[in-house]
Image (cartoon, helix red, strand yellow):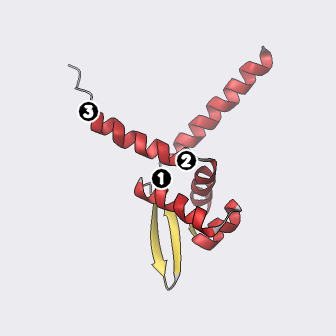
């Protein structure tokens, strides 16, 4: 017996994927996956753009539930909340390599 497709479930999934659909946000996710926790200042330096832009990216990721934050004094630190995202991105990387190999043979 099949279960009915719940549109709200797909909307929720899409909001997470949309939050990831930006190169700068993917850089932030990779950095947090590798390093565990970074301050806004550290992420701003890594991304190479202004602090307000990075703060908007972090807000988007936080609203989607991808990252979490904590404040220590005046510094805000972010960490990856969705620990499964790196596995998903590894899958994407694997397909990109496979597609490149197929294209190279053609």
Q: Could you classify mark 1 by the number of other residues whose Cα lies within 10 Å: few (under 14), some (14-19), or many (20 or more)?
A: few
Residue indicated by mark 2: 86
Q: Where is residue 63 in the image (x, y as percent from the top left)?
A: 41, 57
Label 1: element kind:
loop
Q: Mark 3 or 1 closer to N-term? A: 3
Quadrant in which the C terminus is drawn: top right
Label 3: element kind:
loop
Distance in Å between CA atoms under marks 3 and 1: 25 Å
Q: Residue 18 carries which label?
A: none
Distance in Å between CA atoms under marks 1 and 2: 7 Å
Q: Position of residue 18 (x, y in %)?
A: 48, 43
Q: Could you classify mark 2 by the number of other residues whose Cα lies within 10 Å: few (under 14), some (14-19), or many (20 or more)?
A: some
Q: Residue at x 26, y 32 (%)?
A: 6
The picture quadrant where one finds residue 43 is bottom right
Q: Position of residue 23 (x, y in %)?
A: 63, 48
The picture quadrant where one finds residue 47 is bottom right
In the image, 100: left or right of 35? right
Q: Which mark is residue 6?
A: 3
Distance in Å between CA atoms under marks 3 and 2: 26 Å
Residue indicated by mark 1: 83
Kindly indicate whether the residue at mark 2 contacts the one at mark 1 (C-beta within 8 angstroms): yes
């Amino acid at each position: 017996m099949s279960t009915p497709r719940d549109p709200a479930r797909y909307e929720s999934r899409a909001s997470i994927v949309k939050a990831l659909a930006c190169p700068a946000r993917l850089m932030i996710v990779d950095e947090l996956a590798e390093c565990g926790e970074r301050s806004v200042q550290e992420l701003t330096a890594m991304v190479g753009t202004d602090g307000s832009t990075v703060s908007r990216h972090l807000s988007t990721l936080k609203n989607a539930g991808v990252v979490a934050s904590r404040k220590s004094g005046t510094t805000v630190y972010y960490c990856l909340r969705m620990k499964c995202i790196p596995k998903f991105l590894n899958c994407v990387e694997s397909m990109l390599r496979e597609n490149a190999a197929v294209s190279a043979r053609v």
